Amino acid sequence: MTSADREKEIQIVNKIFKKLKGRGSNPELRGIPFYEAFIHTERGPKILENNSRPGDPEIQNLLPILKDDFVDVCFRILDGNLKRVQFEKRATVVTYMAPPNYGGFKNVFPERVNSSEIGKPVDLSEAYDLTKKYEDNVRIYPGSMELRDDGQTYALGSRTVCAVGIGETIEDAREKSLEGLRAIKGGALWFRTDIASREHIAKSIEHMKKLRNKW
């Protein structure tokens, strides 16, 4: 992404934000009203979708390295005087685990699914124990799960739980994220191992180049 692309994105976002505020009908618009999903083409950035919430999993990458107090940030938003937000200069990688039916995984890779584990409780205890090893550099965030009457947690239909790794490099953060997921047991959950790898990043960059030429 070039600096010109970034400037164009900001122009588009400001235009949408101005539209959301209306012609004086909603001048006190506050909070995180939207995040924009962009695609970059040979004619510049285009919007794929708008969402009226922080992005998931994007927000999981950001909050752990937020230097400002989040509550203070919220109050500054309400007061209308939030000028900037500061983050630590560190890398973060988030990887999700999902149930076998999510994304059609069970149908495409039936040999990778332990059918005897489907519907069984999901144990996060070993993953949480990694905080003793890495302190706050590994974060475990439950997602589509429920606590049942037997006192155990079970996966539902969407993304079940994610692990955020934090490090000085992307590779360091990635390894911590994967270690966090490998410590989670039960539920026949699956996860991608290529997220944020050198190969995955290179493939994404190449894909972006092709999109610019195609669109």
Image (cartoon, rainbow, N blue to C red):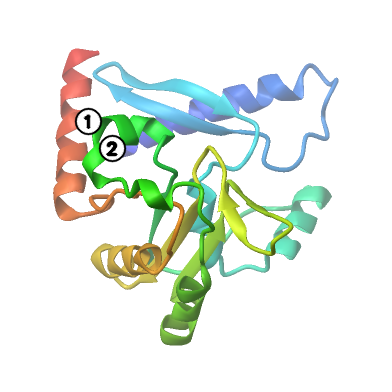
- The local crowd at label 2, few if under 14, some if 14 to 19, many if 20 or more residues have their Cα within 10 Å, is few
Q: Residue at x 24, y 37 (%)?
A: 109
Which secondary structure, mark 1? helix
Indicate the quadrant where residue 21 lies.
Answer: top right
Kindly identify which residue carries mark 2.
1
Instruction: Tell me the quarter of the image containing the C terminus.
Output: top left
Identified at 33% across, 50% down, the residue is: 114
Of 188 and 70, nearer the camera is 188
Could you tell whether 9 is left or right of 176 in the image? right
Q: Residue furthest top?
A: 215
**Mark 1 to mark 2 CA distance (whole Å):** 9 Å
Q: Which mark is residue 208?
A: 1
Q: Is residue 213 above or below residue 60?
A: above
Please name the amino acid that badge 1 sits on: Met
Name the residue rendered at 67%, 41% in the picture. 32
- On screen, residue 49 above or below 131: above
Q: Depth check: 4 or 41 in front?
A: 41
**Farthest-out residue, bottom:** 132
